[in-house]
């Protein structure tokens, strides 16, 4: 079964790379669910095996997407694909040991899942494994799913095929995916994203107000330039928090 899981992960990784290249979105969670459904047929009533098979598929899809982004960036800056491949190969070897060791440290110092690390996606994976192995839905889940499926299906149709979707700005950005993320993520995670987006909009509003009267194309160009810098700043927050958290983790482990 391990060989089948790896072969299936390779096939699903191709789908992942194609979806990421066309949409800039890597549907790793959905791809993992495909693997769970297939292995529910191959290994019925085996929840642990189902989770492992899905994890292998998701890991393959995620890593292939990341490597594709690296190679595309290398193409844009005219880097050597051969050098990139060697670097990726060496990094993959070291990451096997570093990631496993880091996980061991985290589980030794923190409760996972716990108050600090809730890991909300893990509950979705477990529920999916139980579902495809014969467990029924909780009460009222199907009516809820059907209702909001129809609502957001209608929204997508209106956005894509009517003038209402293109003329009303708030409606054109209304997203069922964002709605779903707000359901399964905890409020502290969702609210942090909301306040981050709100702070960016406030900053851009006052910046464009300082520009004064200007043609719309100039304001749009300035907004696009600002977004580039904002992405860099946001990336710094992400990397800074991650690197600092890992240093704190090592200090606690040593002490």
Image (tube, rainbow, N blue to C red):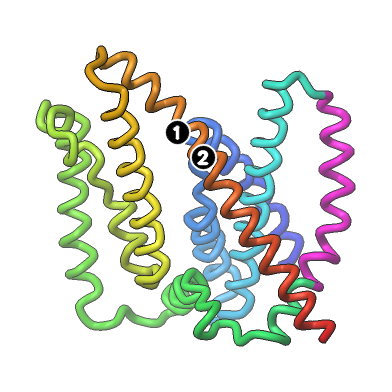
197 relative position to 254: left or right: left
Q: Residue at x 58, y 72 (%)?
A: 50
Which numbered disc covers residue 193?
none
Which numbered disc covers residue 227?
1
Question: Where are the magenta residues, as a range?
Answer: 80-101
Q: Is residue 113 magenta?
A: no
> Could you say whether the residue bearing mark 1 is in a helix, strand or loop?
helix
Q: Is residue 97 magenta?
A: yes
Q: Residue at x 74, y 66 (%)?
A: 2
Q: Residue at x 64, y 85 (%)?
A: 110
Q: Residue at x 66, y 44 (%)?
A: 66
Q: Which residue is mark 2?
A: 231
Which quadrant: the C terminus? bottom right
43 relative position to 6: left or right: left
Q: How many other residues sit within 10 Å of disc 2, few (<14), some (14-19) or many (≥20)?
A: few
Which quadrant: the N terminus? bottom right
User: Gap in Å between the C-alphas at discs 1 and 2?
Assistant: 6 Å
Percent position (x, y) of residue 71? 72, 31
């Amino acid at each position: 079964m391990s060989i089948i899981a790896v072969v299936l992960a390779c096939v699903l990784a191709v789908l992942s790379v194609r979806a990421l290249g066309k949409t800039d979105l890597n549907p790793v969670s959905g791809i993992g669910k495909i693997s769970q459904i297939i292995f529910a047929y191959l290994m019925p009533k085996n929840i642990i095996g189902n989770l492992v098979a899905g994890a292998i598929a998701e890991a393959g899809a995620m890593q292939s997407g990341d490597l594709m982004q690296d190679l595309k960036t290398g193409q844009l800056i005219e880097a050597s694909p051969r050098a990139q491949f060697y670097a990726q190969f060496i990094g993959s070897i070291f990451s096997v040991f570093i990631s496993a060791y880091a996980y061991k440290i985290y589980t030794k110092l923190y409760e996972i899942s716990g108050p600090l690390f809730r890991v909300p996606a893990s509950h979705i994976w477990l529920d999916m494994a139980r579902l495809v192995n014969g467990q029924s839905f909780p009460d009222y889940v199907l009516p809820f799913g059907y209702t909001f499926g129809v609502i957001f299906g209608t929204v997508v149709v209106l956005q894509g095929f009517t003038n209402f979707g293109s003329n009303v700005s708030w409606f054109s950005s209304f997203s069922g995916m964002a709605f779903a993320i707000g359901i399964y993520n905890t409020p502290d995670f969702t609210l942090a994203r909301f306040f981050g987006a709100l702070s960016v909009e406030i900053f851009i509003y006052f910046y464009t107000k300082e520009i004064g009267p200007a043609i719309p194309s100039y304001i749009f160009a300035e907004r696009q330039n600002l977004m580039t810098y904002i992405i860099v700043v946001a990336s710094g927050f992400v990397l800074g928090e991650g690197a600092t958290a890992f240093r704190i983790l090592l200090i606690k482990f040593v002490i």
